[in-house]
């Protein structure tokens, strides 16, 4: 019994001692914390200190919440349907799903061309579950951009930001409809800029923004926004070995998208500017052979005769590093920068030749080497029939003393090829209605049914040549 009491007394004394020691230590810590807090408050007013502390804790989350909330209302789900053929009971369809971004209140939408390619019916679903039939206004294969229009008003929309202001490491949000899950938002950082992943097989302009925001099937055509809610890119592709998201997402920069959209809306096609040369990357060994003290730039490979570069005095092996003060330290950066301009624009080119920094001015031209706003039109109604067209330029109009639409190419095994029409045919009328330009012809064809007769001529062949075909 005495042994029991002795054990209880010793245990009690030990516990009491530990509690007293802890209390003394904890009190000292509280006093230190209070003193530190008092010091901070003495340096700044208490209200100001609390305000700044709250701001630090909430600034990122608020930026994400506000930007995401606004962007979700401006991103639509897109369903593209292609009629593949007929069976005894019903039509057979091919469907694809993606996303689109409303870019003004009247219903213009930008998306990826591959989302709606060859679609016969395009349906857009808004955040509030309304469905709209969409019309394809135009597209540009070389950038994978398409512009749609729905009949609506007062829509929420996103404003273009300047993608060139993005910094590697900056937070961005991807908004879209992966796996048909509407209005999904993912976050990531800008991993790199001016990426070329060769998904266009060297036929397009690639200068992607790389992010680690999760992108999956259905996100294509959706918005990449910064934390202020501005549209800085259109989500387009992922790099993957499994077929699913692996941390590498790519978006077309808004600097490219904005120019393409504005041209399609204004002219029906992109008014692409050309410097009249081809370029290649500068390697370490190449930089040494060119007497450069850095590795970078776009080296001029071939200069086209009578092109803008030749007239400006650029030579092979010149290394272009800036255009109008925008750095072009890689081929993708060079292509992205040139894509901002239109035919007729004058630019200042900064380049190295034999190790010496030089400048020159160049007037950019179009694909037929003039400064006119001319572009090859590939509207769906045209390619379905089987040809690609462009307007006559000012020199051709003066020489031929006429307006019209010039046939650039004829697609094999189509209605147009069946008429035996050849490229370089100049269309001047459709069903006895005068044709002054491609836009006018496209509008006629959009509404045509039954027998269609095109009249026109070839510049180097005498006589008039009518071509007749049927439109369903």
Image (spheres, helix red, strand yellow):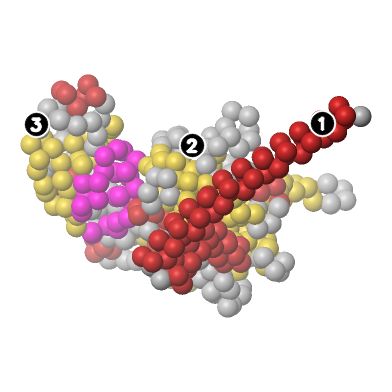
Residue 92 visible within the image: yes
- Point out the stretch of residues depicted in magenta: 322-345
| Label disc, if present, on residue 354 of the rendered structure | 3
Q: Say which element carries label 3.
A: loop
Judge whether 377 appears above or below 307 on screen: below
Residue at x 21%, y 46% (from the top left corner): 322
- Crowdedness of circle 2 by 10 Å Cα count: few (<14), some, many (20+)? few
Rendering coords of residue 439 (x, y %): 45, 65
Q: Which of labels 2 and 3 is toward the front?
A: 3
Q: Tag 1's secondary structure?
A: helix
Where residue 306 sits: x, y (%)?
A: 17, 45
Quarter of the image for the N terminus: give it. top right
Tag on residue 471? none
Rounded to the nearest angstrom, the CA distance separating label 2 from label 1 is 84 Å
Q: CA distance from mark 3 to mark 1?
A: 97 Å
**Residue 419 image offset from top left, x and y in percent:** 53, 49
Label placed on residue 199: 2
Q: Earlier in the sequence, mark 2 or mark 1?
A: 1
**Magenta includes 341?**
yes
* Mark seen at residue 6: 1
Q: Which quadrant holds residue 216? A: top right
């Amino acid at each position: 019994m005495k042994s029991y009491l002795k054990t209880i007394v010793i245990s009690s004394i030990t516990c009491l001692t530990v509690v007293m020691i802890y209390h003394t230590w904890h009190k000292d810590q509280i006093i230190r914390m209070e003193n530190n807090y008092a010091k901070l408050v003495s340096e700044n007013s208490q209200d100001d200190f609390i305000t700044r502390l709250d701001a630090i804790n909430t600034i990122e989350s608020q930026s994400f919440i506000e930007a995401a909330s606004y962007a979700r209302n401006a991103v639509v789900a897109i369903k593209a349907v292609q009629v593949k053929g007929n069976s005894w009971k019903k039509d057979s369809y091919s469907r694809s799903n993606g996303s689109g971004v409303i870019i003004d209140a009247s219903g213009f939408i930008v998306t990826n061309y591959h989302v709606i390619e060859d679609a016969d019916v395009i349906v857009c679903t808004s955040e509030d579950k309304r469905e709209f039939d969409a019309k394809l206004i135009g597209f540009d294969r070389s950038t994978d951009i398409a512009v749609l229009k729905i009949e609506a008003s007062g829509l929420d929309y996103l404003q273009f930001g300047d993608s060139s202001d993005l910094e590697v490491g900056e937070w961005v949000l991807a908004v879209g409809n992966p796996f048909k899950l509407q209005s999904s938002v993912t976050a990531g950082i800008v991993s790199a800029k001016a990426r070329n992943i060769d998904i266009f097989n060297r036929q397009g302009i690639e200068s992607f923004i790389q992010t680690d925001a999760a992108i999956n099937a259905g996100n294509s055509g959706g918005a990449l926004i910064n934390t202020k809610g501005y549209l800085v890119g259109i989500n387009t592709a992922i790099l993957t070995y499994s077929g699913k998201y692996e941390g590498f997402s790519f978006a077309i920069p808004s600097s490219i998208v904005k120019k393409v959209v504005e041209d399609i809306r204004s002219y029906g096609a992109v008014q692409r500017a050309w410097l009249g040369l081809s370029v290649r990357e500068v390697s370490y060994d190449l930089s040494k052979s060119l007497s450069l003290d850095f590795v970078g730039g776009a080296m001029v490979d071939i200069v086209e005769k009578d092109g803008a570069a030749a007239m400006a005095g650029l030579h092979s092996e010149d290394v272009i590093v800036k255009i109008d003060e925008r750095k072009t330290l890689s081929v993708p950066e060079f292509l992205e920068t040139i894509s901002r301009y239109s035919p007729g624009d004058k630019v200042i080119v900064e380049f190295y030749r034999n190790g010496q920094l030089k400048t020159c001015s160049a007037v950019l031209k179009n694909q037929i080497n003039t400064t006119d706003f001319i572009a090859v039109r590939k509207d769906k109604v045209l390619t379905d029939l089987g040809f690609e067209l462009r307007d006559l330029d000012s020199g051709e109009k003066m020489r031929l003393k006429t307006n019209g639409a010039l046939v650039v190419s004829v697609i094999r095994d189509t209605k147009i090829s069946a008429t035996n029409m050849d490229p370089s045919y100049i269309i001047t009328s459709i069903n006895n209605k005068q044709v002054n330009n491609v836009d006018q012809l496209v509008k006629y064809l959009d509404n045509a049914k039954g027998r269609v007769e095109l009249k026109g001529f070839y510049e180097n062949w005498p006589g008039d040549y009518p071509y007749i075909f049927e439109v369903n």
